[in-house]
Amino acid sequence: MTFEPNILAFCCNWCSYAAADLAGIGRMDQPTNIKIVRVMCSGRVKPEFVIKALSDGVDGVLILGCHIGDCHYVTGNHRTMKRFQVLERLLEHIGIDPRRIRLDWASAAEAEPFSNMIREFTEQIRELGPNPYAGSYA
């Protein structure tokens, strides 16, 4: 039996969530093991949210926002990018493989790239295997 990862995706309301919606409307092929949390801006996603998700057993976390320069809140995705760099180092420091998280951008019209991101990340997490850190840091 193939391991099916449990993946959480934080999607900004204005772009990446709209891309996810468009991908669904277009019936694009994508994994069904993604749970989407709609946030108003990727800048709203705090590192604590990601660590909590991983400690609760999620195998991988995606943070998807508007392209740099297109944020509806002007600097939200810049904040996200800075936080993500810190988050990667923090995860490494506490022993969590930083490949379990990914930051990417998708505009509302990018349904196909969104689907590709989901497939690529799911395959990456499948190769990493189940999250060995579940319940360790709660």
Image: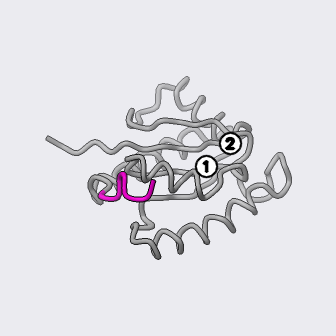
Secondary structure mostly seen in the magenta stretch: loop
Residue type at mark 2 is: Cys
Query: x, y (%) of residue 101?
Result: 48, 58
Residue that badge 2 annotates: 12
> Which residue type carries mark 1?
Leu
Q: Position of residue 117 (x, y in %)?
A: 49, 49
User: Residue at the left extreme?
Assistant: 1
Q: Residue at image x 52%, y 27%?
A: 24
Numbered range of the magenta stretch: 132-138
Horizontal side of residue 129 vs 89, given as left or right? left
Cβ–Cβ under 8 Å for marks 2 and 1: yes
Colour theme: one colour
Residue 97's place in the image compared with 133, above or below, is: below
Find residue 64 and name its label: 1
Q: Which of the 4 image quarters holds residue 41?
A: top right
Whether residue 31 sits left or right of residue 74 in the image: it is left
